[in-house]
């Protein structure tokens, strides 16, 4: 990976993180905030993956696996929470 690609990738991830943090702050509903935090975790995973590729080392792979599992479990928990919440609101 060249330095130009690494810098461009990190700048894109930083811009995406800024937009997601704005959504966390201004999200009109709690669901928007929950989804934004899940997306923020995916951005962190991408950043750690880029760092691992830049330094050409595989020591970050266990961290990537744990973050991926946490992201998946968080997404499933959000979906279950929202499905139970919508069941209660039905007439």
Image (cartoon, rainbow, N blue to C red):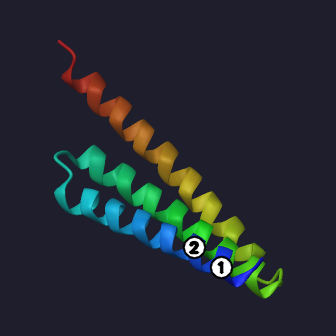
Q: Quadrant of residue 38?
A: bottom left
- Local secondary structure at mark 2: helix
- Whole-percent x and y of residue 22? 25, 62
Q: Is residue 56 above or below residue 85?
A: below
- Farthest-out residue, front: 4
Q: Quadrant of residue 9?
A: bottom right
Q: Is residue 62 above or below residue 33?
A: below
Q: Nearer the viewer, residue 67 or 36?
A: 36
Proximity of marks 2 and 1: CB atoms separated by less than 8 Å: yes
Instruction: Name the disc covering residue 8, or none.
Output: 2
Name the residue located 83 percent from the left edge and 84 percent from the top edge.
57
- Whole-percent x and y of residue 53? 76, 77
Instruction: Name the disc covering residue 4, or none.
Output: 1
Instruction: Name the disc covering residue 25, or none.
Output: none
- Local secondary structure at mark 1: helix
* Count of residue discs: 2
Q: Is residue 48 left or right of residue 22?
A: right
Q: Quadrant of the N terminus?
A: bottom right
Q: Nearer the viewer, residue 90 or 21?
A: 21
Q: Is residue 33 left or right of residue 47?
A: left
Name the residue located 34 percent from the left edge and 68 percent from the top edge.
18
Residue at mark 2 to residue at mark 1: CA–CA distance: 6 Å
Q: Nearer the viewer, residue 2 or 22?
A: 2
Q: Quadrant of the C terminus?
A: top left
User: Badge 2: how crowded within 10 Å, few (<14), some, or many (20+)?
Assistant: few
Name the residue located 38 percent from the left edge and 49 percent from the top edge.
35
Name the residue located 57 percent from the left edge and 73 percent from the top edge.
8
- Whole-percent x and y of residue 44? 53, 70
- Farthest-out residue, top: 91
């Amino acid at each position: 990976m060249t330095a130009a690609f690494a810098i461009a990738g990190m700048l894109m991830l930083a811009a995406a993180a800024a937009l997601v943090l704005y959504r966390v702050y201004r999200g009109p509903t709690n669901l928007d905030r929950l989804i934004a935090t899940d997306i923020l975790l995916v951005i962190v995973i991408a950043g750690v993956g880029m760092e691992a590729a830049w330094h050409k080392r595989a020591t970050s792979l266990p961290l990537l696996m744990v973050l991926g599992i946490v992201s998946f479990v968080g997404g499933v928990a959000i979906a279950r929470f929202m499905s139970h919440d919508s069941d209660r609101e039905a007439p």
